[in-house]
Image (cartoon, grey):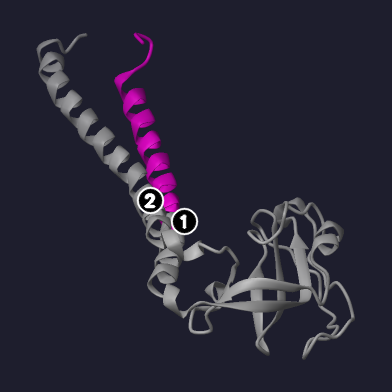
Amino acid sequence: MSGIKSEDIKTLKRVFFIVAFVLTFIWLVVMGVLSLDAWSIHNNADGYQKKTFVVGYSYYSAGSKGSRTRRTTSVRVGRFGYRESAPRRHGSGPRWYAEGEVDGAEEKFSLKGALPRRPKSQEDLESMVSTGARLEVWYNPEQPKDLRVLDYEEDRFAHTYARAMLPTVAGFIPMVALCVTVVALKIRSRRQSPEVAENPGA
């Protein structure tokens, strides 16, 4: 450590705290979104009813890996029919979902909790969810678009409070840890400062 200058140490500390702050902020945003969704489901649990989701189209995208989303079939289901769409990419990880109908209303359904396994491609997804497939779901038309249709679990709403609290608590853990680290380093720095003042040539 004798070869490391005091200024270098200070610079490294600044870089560490900047990176830690940015990562903590991102984590808070992600957990905040998850928490808001979970609390919305918890507070509106009584409005969900068991319904049938009729698949019109299914979509798969590998995100940044380069796979492109595309329409799957020309078979018409209710008001759904074949629609040409330009392939599109997105910058996040893999995602898969379906568009279809619930009680005649056009809805979007994230399939991540409704499939027996994780699909690896569009063809793999279509082998599990074909056009016209009927899936049991929980449905609440009064919720925001992404929360109206939920995958069906018999006891899904039995632990909504715990599911809402988990991301809430998890979101604050890194922030608390960062604050504790800052305070600990400040205390250590103040304790060492008299020694530096007494030994300026050290």
Please rate how many residues cluster around mark 2, counting C-alpha atoms within 10 Å: few if below 14, some from 14 to 19, many from 20.
many
Please rate how many residues cluster around mark 1, counting C-alpha atoms within 10 Å: few if below 14, some from 14 to 19, many from 20.
few
Q: Is residue 13 magenta?
A: yes
Quarter occupied by residue 190: top left
- Tally the numbered discs: 2
Circle 2/circle 1 CB separation < 8 Å? yes
Amino acid type assigned to the residue bearing label 2 in the image? Gly
- At x 32%, y 45%, the residue is 175
Q: The N terminus lies in which quarter of the figure?
A: top left
Front one among 47 and 172:
47
**Mark linked to residue 30:** 1
In the image: residue 51, left or right of residue 179: right
In the image: residue 94, left or right of residue 66: left
Return the disc, 2 or 1, that comes first in the chain's sequence: 1
Q: Which x, y percent locates residue 152?
A: 60, 66
Note whether 139 is above or below 32 in the view shown: below
Amino acid type assigned to the residue bearing label 1 in the image? Val
Q: Which x, y percent locates residue 167?
A: 41, 53
Front one among 23 and 73:
73
- Which secondary structure, mark 1? helix
**Residue at which label 2 appears:** 171
- Which secondary structure, mark 2? helix
Q: Distance between the residues labelled 2 and 1?
A: 8 Å
Front one among 101 and 170:
101
Q: What stretch is highlighted in magenta?
A: 1-29
- At x 51%, y 62%, the residue is 155
Q: Which x, y percent locates residue 40?
A: 42, 71
Note whether 89 is above or below 173 in the view shown: below
- Most common secondary structure along the magenta stretch: helix
In the image: residue 172, left or right of residue 137: left
Q: Which x, y percent locates residue 117?
A: 73, 51
- At x 38%, y 51%, the residue is 171
